[in-house]
Image (cartoon, rainbow, N blue to C red):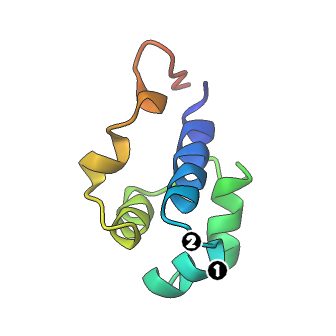
Amino acid sequence: MKLQRAVALRISNLLIKHNMTRYALCKKIVMPEQTLKNIIDERNQDIKLTTIAKISDGFGLSIEEFFADSLFNKDTLDID
């Protein structure tokens, strides 16, 4: 699985888990909704770590907790 796909799925899963909309997350972290949409729709090929940090914070997670998911298993992740 591509890294962009794993990040998109992780965010989508967290939105469901926290019963939160994209709009609500964007308002909470002060991020343009289009930015989040592009990440989730896998249009953004180079996601900044600072962006992931903001998103993680919006869910009350550290960056480590964000990446602590089986989606980011190095054996199944394609980082090209």
Report the amino acid beneath label 2: Met
Residue at coordinates 39% horizontally, 66% vertically from top-left? 59
Q: Is residue 75 left or right of residue 47?
A: left
Nearer to us of marks 1 and 2 is: 2
**Relative height, residue 72 to residue 8 (above, below):** above
Can you say which quadrant of the picture contains the C terminus?
top right
Residue at coordinates 29% horizontally, 53% vertically from top-left? 63
Can you say which quadrant of the picture contains the N terminus?
top right
Q: Is residue 45 left or right of residue 7?
A: right
Residue at coordinates 40% horizontally, 72% vertically from top-left? 58
Query: Is residue 11 or residue 42 the one in the foreground?
Result: 11
Q: Which residue is mark 2?
A: 20
Which residue reaches farthest top? 75
Report the amino acid beneath label 1: Tyr
**Relative height, residue 9 to residue 33 (above, below):** above
Estimate the x, y position of residue 25 in percent, counting from the top left.
Answer: 53, 76
Estimate the x, y position of residue 13 in percent, counting from the top left.
Answer: 56, 50
**Relative height, residue 76 to residue 45 (above, below):** above
Estimate the x, y position of residue 77 in percent, counting from the top left.
Answer: 50, 22
| Secondary structure category for the residue under label 1 | helix
Label 2 neighbourhood size at 10 Å, few (<14), some (14-19), many (20+)? few
- What number of labels is visible? 2
Residue 57: quarter of image: bottom left
Residue 2: quarter of image: top right
| Secondary structure category for the residue under label 2 | loop
User: Any mark on residue 23, and which?
Assistant: 1
Q: Is residue 67 left or right of residue 43?
A: left
Query: Is residue 31 or residue 23 the one in the foreground?
Result: 23
Estimate the x, y position of residue 4 in percent, counting from the top left.
Answer: 59, 41
Residue at coordinates 70% horizontally, 74% vertically from top-left? 34
